[in-house]
Amino acid sequence: MLAPSLGSRAASILFGVALLASGQNSTLTGTLAGQIVMEGFVSIRLKPWLRRLSTRLTVIIPAVITVLLAGEKGVDVLLTLSQVILSIQLPFAVIPLIYFTSSTQVMGKDFVNGLLTKVIGWTAALLFVGLNSWLLLGMVVAAAGGSL
């Protein structure tokens, strides 16, 4: 889909590589989060291979079922929808992260964000909120039959 619109096959390849890298990152993060929750909060101790298998299957099985139900043409829509949902939820993760890491009560004097980090973080958060607001407004206007 990207090659015709951008005029280069490299865009499609770069997007694919970025998608694979982000998938690996989320898999690793999900596995570690599952381990922390299972061992630290729920006190379930499993062998590492069994823990990895259970946390990954918990994610993979619903994804495979969804892709199978959507069919080949539906995968493009699902991919786009997943990216829209991820972009909308991003501020809900970034804003508390910046807030808590900027607090000396939470982080202490030695580990609190510096001024430059705070400025960059809050600027990025405002950009995310602004772009998502524009996206949602565009979707509402388009659903009503208009255009921005």
Image: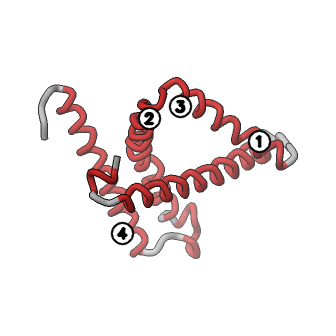
Q: Is residue 82 above or below residue 20?
A: above
Q: Earlier in the sequence, mark 3 or mark 4?
A: 3
Residue situated furthest top in the rendering: 69
Give the class, few, some or many, for how many residues have Cα within 10 Å of label 1's Cα (few <14, many ≥20). few
Question: Marks 1 and 2, Cα distance to the nearest angstrom?
Answer: 25 Å
Give the class, few, some or many, for how many residues have Cα within 10 Å of label 3's Cα (few <14, many ≥20). some
Give the amino acid at mark 1: Leu
Q: Earlier in the sequence, mark 2 or mark 3?
A: 3
State the image quarter where residue 41 is shown.
top right
Q: Are marks 2 and 3 in contact (CB under 8 Å)?
A: yes
Label 1 belongs to which residue? Answer: 53
Q: Which of marks 4 and 2 is nearer the N terminus?
A: 2
Label 3 belongs to which residue? Answer: 67
Camera-nearest label, 1 or 4? 1
Q: Nearer the viewer, residue 52 or 16?
A: 16
Give the amino acid at mark 4: Val
Camera-nearest label, 1 or 3? 3
Label 2 belongs to which residue? Answer: 78
Give the class, few, some or many, for how many residues have Cα within 10 Å of label 2's Cα (few <14, many ≥20). some
Q: Which of marks 1 and 3 is nearer the N terminus?
A: 1
In the rendered view, does 115 fall on the left or right side of 134? right
Q: Nearer the viewer, residue 56 or 106?
A: 56
In the rendered view, does 62 fall on the left or right side of 124? right
Label 4 belongs to which residue? Answer: 119
Residue at the spot x=40%, y=74% of the render? 115
State the image quarter where residue 38 is shown.
top right
Give the class, few, some or many, for how many residues have Cα within 10 Å of label 4's Cα (few <14, many ≥20). few
Question: Helix or strand or loop: what does disc 2 sit on?
Answer: helix
Camera-nearest label, 4 or 2? 2
Q: Are marks 1 and 3 in contact (CB under 8 Å)?
A: no
